[in-house]
Amino acid sequence: MTLHLPEPPVPPPGPVPFAQAPEAWPEAPLSPVAWRAVKAAGLAAIGERVLARERLDVEDGIALFRNRDLAAIGALANHVRERRHGDWTWFNRNQHVNATNVCEASCIFCSFSRLKTGDPAAYTMAVTEAVGRVAAFSDTFLTEVHMVNGLNPDVPFSYYLDILRGWKRIRPDVHIKAFTAVEIHYFAEKYGMSYPSVLGALTAAGLGSLPGGGAEIFHPRARKKLCGDKVDADGWLEVHRTAHRLGLRSNATMLFGSIERIDERVDHLHRLRDLQDQTGGFQTFIPLKYHNENNRLHKLGEPTDVDCLKTLAVARLYLDNFEHIKAYWIMLGIQLAQVSQWFGVDDIDGTVREERIYHMAGAKTPQELTRGELMALIRRAGRIPVERDTLYHVVADTAEAS
Ligand code: V47
């Protein structure tokens, strides 16, 4: 089916301002002990640039990943994290919905999708069911619904518009963060629309921002192996560029710890930093740890905790124009999410409720944490919990730090 919708108006290009000024926090010096560790790790030159707020280059990124001294890398990342956010760690109250897992793409790391309608465990919720998932919690405080889906060839574009409209009807105040760039690209191809018209129609129906999924690894060698039949890096980045131009904020992810090389991780970070320089529209970077159950890469081990912490820390150091680095507690585990707050992380995502993608890939974390549990896990890690909405406004009566 082809929908012919008018192109939405395009605001003038230009950077979108950060929600919070990077200079918001006074800079504390790196402790002498930490600096000695940085020097002993052979990272003095990189450390000096970090302290001077100078940009790291590709070779620095590779050197950091190759360096074995996690404590030294973490100390630098923590310095940057505290420079931007002090002791605050952000979280939100959100709900995840995956309306369909039917997916034309065959990404070898994915445990969630099913190729065809009718395959065992394939599902497509009726619009009323998807709307009902949010309606069921109408007495619970919520600021965000997060939806991502498979690339389902059997539903019309109106299916997604109706879900968004249904949610807005029952929860007009809730921000809807939905559809990866891969889905937006798929809608454009399948329904014969441009990126701006897809995004314009979804926004008119209630979409508030884009999540960061589908980025995987941008480098063509790894991408071809991991997910060769979905949109390439340029397409993914172009969708986000378009979203930012239309005034939508978005997130970015990187699937790490499967078959990618270190230089491919740095290439990935570099491409994101480049686009952020041009648009300023990314809010948060979320490194996603590869999970190995129930997918075609199951023979691979999962990345170690050391690798997870290092990846979060290097991301904090390399992405000097990203305001937030998120440790998604669902995929990292609660304890590592706590530790990560000393390795560059300032956000741990939200209450979540009903997560499928990671639990089908073997995640052992709970399906949901309450606001109290999230706040306790942040406090026990020695940080101050601050509840936010999707766009990082402090939720008024829960500003613990103010
Ligand atoms: O795009 C799928 C990844 C992503 C596996 O924007 C896997 O706030 C590891 O993007 N092992 C979807 N990773 C989740 C996502 C996300 C999550 C939380 C917050 C936000 C945000 C975005 O999950 C996919 C893919 O990269 N993924 N399967 C797996 N076996």
Image (cartoon, grey):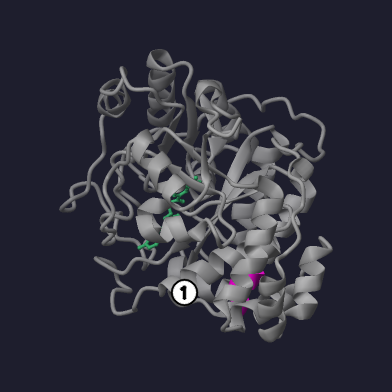
Q: Position of residue 256 (x, y in %)?
A: 48, 68
For ligand 1, the image quadrant comes to bottom left
* Residue 211 appears anywhere in the view: no
Q: Nearer the viewer, residue 371 or 258?
A: 371
The quadrant the N terminus occupies is: top left
Task: Look at the picture and state if 282 lies above or below 145.
Answer: below
Residue appearing at x 34%, y 51% in the figure: 103
Q: Position of residue 242 (x, y in %)?
A: 68, 41
* Location of mark 1 (residue): 306
Task: Look at the picture and state if 139 lies above or below 312.
Answer: above
Task: Check residue 30 for magenta coloring.
Answer: no
Residue appearing at x 76%, y 39% in the figure: 21
Question: Considering the numbered disc 1 on the image, is that residue within a helix, a strand or a loop?
Answer: helix
Q: Position of residue 71 (x, y in %)?
A: 57, 74
Q: Nearer the viewer, residue 397 or 192?
A: 397
Q: Is residue 32 left or right of residue 147?
A: right
Q: Is residue 90 left or right of residue 169?
A: right
Residue appearing at x 49%, y 41% in the figure: 187
Q: Position of residue 270 (x, y in %)?
A: 70, 65
The quadrant the C terminus occupies is: top right
Q: Is residue 157 left or right of residue 130?
A: right
Q: Nearer the viewer, residue 241 or 352?
A: 352
Amino acid under disc 1: Val
Task: Look at the picture and state if 372 lies above or below 365.
Answer: above
Which secondary structure type mostly characterizes the magenta part of the structure? helix
Task: Check residue 264 for magenta coloring.
Answer: yes
Mark 1, Cα crowd under 10 Å, few <14 / some 14-19 / many 20+, is few
Q: Nearer the viewer, residue 127 or 90?
A: 90
* Residue 5 appears anywhere in the view: yes
Among the 4 quarters of the image, the one containing residue 273: bottom right
- Which residues are the magenta region? 263-267
